Image (spheres, coloured by chain):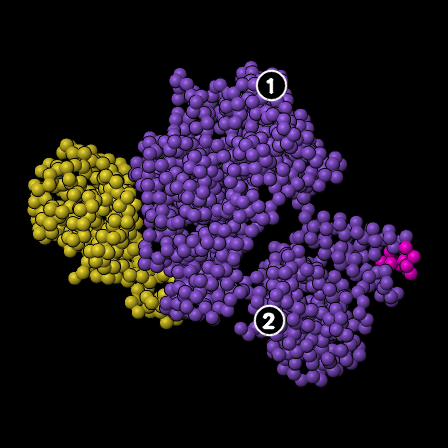
Amino acid sequence: MKPLITNIQRFCVHDGPGIRTTVFFKGCSLHCPWCANPENISFNEQYFYIKEKCSVFCKYVHTCKTRKTAVANEEDILNCCFGAIGKFGKHYSNDELFDELVKDVQYYGNDGGVTFSGGESLLFLPYYDQMVQKLREKKINTCVETALFVPKDKVEWAIENIDFFYVDIKVLEEGTCHEILGGDTGIFLSNLKFLYDRIGREKIIYRMPIIAGITLTDANVEIVKHVLNDFPPKRVEIFSVHNLGKKKYERLNKEPAAAPQVGMDILSEVKKCMETTGNEVVINSI
Amino acid sequence: MKYNVNAVIVTCNRRKLLQQALESLLNQTYELNKIVVVNNASTDGTKEYLDSLEDEHLVVLHKEVNEGGAGGFYYGIKEAYDIGCDFVWIMDDDTICIPESLERLMESFEVLNGRPVGFLASNVLYKDGNPCFMNICHPEYVWNEFVAEGIVRITHCSFVAMLIPTWVIKEVGFPIKEYFIWGDDGEYSTRILQKYEGYLCGKSVVYHYMNENVGVDIWNVEESRIDRFFYFYRNWMCTNKMRSQMAVKQFERESKALIKSIRKSNTSNKWRKIKVIKQGLREGRKFDVTIQYPDKSNAAKTTNTSRKGIKYRLFRIFRYFAVKYDIKTQGYVTYCKELYRKFVKVEPTTWEKIKFLIKGGLRTKLYDSGSKTNDLSQLLKEVKFDFCESKYFAYTVDVYKTWKIKTRQMANCAIDYELLLNHSLDDLRMEDDGEQYTSENNQIVEILKEYCDRLAQEVGKRNLKNRDSIAVWMKKIQSHPAESLEEALQRILVMNQVMWQTRHIQMGLGRLDLLLEKYIRDDMTEEYLEDVLSDFIQVLHSYYWMKSEEMPGDTGQIIILGGLDANGKYVCNQITYAVIRAIKKLQIPDPKVLLRVTSETPENLWKLAVDCISTGVGSPLISNDDRIIPSLTEFGYELEDARNYVTSACWEIIPGNSCEQNNIGVFDFAAAFDLLAKKEDLDALDTWDKFIWQYSVQMCGHANFMVHLVDYIEWEKDPLMSFFKVACRESHTDISEGGGKYNNYGVLSVGLSNTVNSLINIRKYVYEEKRFTLKELYTMRNKNFVGNEDVHALLKNSKKYFGEDDQTQDAIGLANWLIMRINETVVDYRNRFDGRVKFGLSSPGYITIGTNMPATFDGRLDYEAYNVHISADDNQNITALLNFASQLKYDEAGFNGNVVDFTMSPQFIRDNMDKFVTLLRASIKSGVFQMQMNVIDSTTLMAAKKNPEKYPNLIVRVWGFSAYFKDLPEEYKDFVIERAIKNEAANN
């Protein structure tokens, strides 16, 4: 199956050092209910429908199935002039993606570069091996965001080829993780150990969403603290989830997950608690 | 295209003629939909005749009472409108058409495609074929645009054969039925012409079967018809009343003159005539009518045409003084009006306005003796000093006094300030060789010396903080060069205030850091420099309202910082930093700063500049020497002059030692869409190549027209400006006679972005996918896509390639090709001083021109603004925009200011200062010409629009200057808000 990409976002300032271009891959090994990019969970092309853009002036207003059912229909996409129906997911070849990523090369400077996000970017990156090699030849910094719920060979590839890792830490209790995210914590832990042993502390940053009742439970925080003790990273970033993905859920005709936002006070508490492991913890405002 | 046309005939007791008229209508080659006949209570059997006719086209209205022509046309047009049609064609019962009359009119309508046509009139002939004197239409000032097609633009029209589109009727309403007869057509056609254009189609002929071919005038009128003049005077009085008080006054004056001459003459029945006129005028003053609209909701908006508001009353007071003191000088009233117009933009309270009017009315004086040096001498002798608050300097402009400008005065550039810094006034004296220039030059030396003496004296009398030093400096200016920083700054202020005093608008301050470099002493601390320069800037900010030209903030006082020196080394010094720091701290929109940068610009200067930008003050505008100087030398400027460039009020480059006029006209890339439809057969353009070539031909024609406008400019003789320009001093020639060094002129442009996006859409949908033919697309566009909302959405939602580095549609190639075609057009042009023409891609006209132009094919609807300067239409992919801008062609003649304009939220810049500096530096390296930023968030803007009093100091960037948001016209406020919202949508 060819990898699909939903978005290539340029002039990103939040996904790592310097000015970066972020690639969002489509497809994820987990299905976190708070996901802000629900279009990147499924591995297949998906059609979406933006109700607000749909207009009564459309010629097909009476025949359009999408309008009737509010579920995007592939047949209607060509007829739609109003941009109400669209498609998530586009395939790029190695060269195409490379061309897109070097457009901003003059802005990357010394520390900026490319970030691969998703979805689970590690699942797809080995396919773009050739492209990544070309980036490395141009000395463009590369960075992945991963949850590490992937086969070991992918991690091994990444260790060889990627400069920097953002590792998501979510739910590490075995039962809950399987139930809510659909992931096996054993894979995560063994991958983390494997990665950590090979690249060391300076090349890893952990990111953790704080969601009351899911990631923010006493048991989970305890396990996370253990992980921080065993594999101390360069930095830990914690943040409260935002509901920016809500519109996208609607467009995909999915129920948006109600992930309760936590206040700054709780974040500071978590920060304090985690700092007891001797790591630097910062609160991300996004 | 076939339109539905309903004809309207009003008849009264002329059965025979009516019969002929109806026949001529039924015989039209262009078939009519309905013919509405209004029978105005005829008694000669017309009713029976009409009832006997059985034709499906006929609709007959019988009126019990004769309501005159006006009433008849009112009911007739209303009926025709209610039946439904695209056009209403109205005429009298004695109007006989030839069979092609209507067809010719409709052909003319097609020719006028795209013009806002309000009515079309036929050529009215008397039955013997001579022109019908009663129905002569007068041509507009510019009447000959379509004369090759036999179409002439006219100023009014009679109801004898007039074709009106129904959408016009919908907007302007019906004729006024209360007028009974006479003046109803004049009123109606002028009402239409307030918003539309009227044309006479020479090929469409109608005959007016009157008894005698005579025009009507009160001198020769038959006795029985004298009473009819009552209606004439009553109705015109009423019409003028709706127009303006000025028109009423005018009409009264004319009528009085007429009465007087009738009284003195020996015409028959003269007392009766005078009585009728007087009666008419009297009635007219009392006569109140309301205009009826087909759609009731329109009515309230437009009936209130009389001007009785406070503004008008203030104007009356103002005029009273104007008239009392100096009625003879036409320029005086104009100048007073101009001052008042500027003043009310920034000062809304009534009391202040009244105070201003009284003061202005009494004090305003224009000097016009025929000799410029005499004017100047007189002016500077009499100006009142009104020093503004300052710690270090004296600065005063008497806004009410100035010299008269008869034609057009050179301005909007910079004078050579170093002349009076490095020399004294005595040094600038020239050896008398009998030439006019030298004698004027020496006179100006004397005048300025006298002026400085007066300043020195006055300063001594006033309680100025630094008065002793200022008095000394004012003496020293006459015999010594400037010696200290403060003295140099004071000299610049004196030159600046003299320029303002003589209405040299929008004069820049030059390269301030370079000018002042030699006055920097080691013992000057950062704080001291910042303090002095803050004071200097604040002083320049005074008289803000008077200095603002088109809009508050448009003062043109631009300080140029940084940039290469004559040896090609990057210059920046303590002054550079201090000025930016001062601007950042003061948070005032004027004067503004342009920072010249190269790849050599130090990181900390960049940081300071970005820091200043992030406060939202709008300054500095960034200008890329690495890109600009090579294009200047390539164009033909000497390297030293190229390196020493400054700019006009916004961004238009003025190489050193020249005095160029860079804002002569604005060229509209998108205007060719209209021209193309007018001049070419759209069906014949069956391939993209043919289309784009013809497009460029029309575009170049338009460009050529704009360029040749320069030929007609008559420059005002200007010994003062010539005094301060090195080039003029060398050539001993006045600036108005080509004394400047290069004498090149610049035009600006708008609409490139909309044009490129439109062309790409046309290529895609017309020539590649063949969804519509070009003609179909034009037809939809001419109706502003009403009824074709889906097509409009398609065009609007198509990806906009201008400002994107997505190369799939080669937008950059297309844009550069258009630019190249313009270059080809202007390359050979030489003005009378052998100067050339240059152009730029950014112009202040994006709203004013856009709101006068019909829809384009990129989703922009009728009369919407164009995209601003070089900017992306919707999503703000900033790196893509900068990449795109760096690939545009700015060489050859295309260097007259090319600003990339984007919006950023202040939070974003503050959080990512270093990354933002990296972004700007990299974009300069890759070749962006110039850029400016609006740092603002939409929430603040919207709150400020709602409650302006809570945000008195909020500054935004418009055109190429900064302004207080509260002072902006509403459409500019909305425009800035819209762009901020788009930016936030794209970056979140």
Task: Say above or below: B294 vs A40.
Answer: below
Q: Looking at the picture, how far across and down is residue A20, in whole percent?
A: 26, 44
Residue B913 relative to residue B67: left or right: left
Nearer the observer, B38 or A218: B38
For residue A11, what is the image quadrant? top left
- Give the number of the disc on residue B106: 2
Q: Secondary structure at mark 1?
A: helix
Q: Position of residue A170 (x, y in %)?
A: 17, 46
Q: Is residue B796 magenta?
A: no
Q: Split into 4 quadrants, where in the image is the C terminus of chain A?
A: top left
Residue at 81% of width from left, 57% of height from top? Answer: B280
Check the residue under mark 1 and report the chain it is in: B
- The residue lying furthest to the top in this view is B468
- Which residue in the protein does label 1 denote? B456
Which residue in the rendered view is the most extreme toward the front?
B433
Chain letter for purple? B
Q: Is B309 on the left-hand or right-hand side of B392?
A: right
**Disc number at residue B89?**
none
Q: Residues within 10 Å of mark 1 (few under 14, many from 20)?
A: many
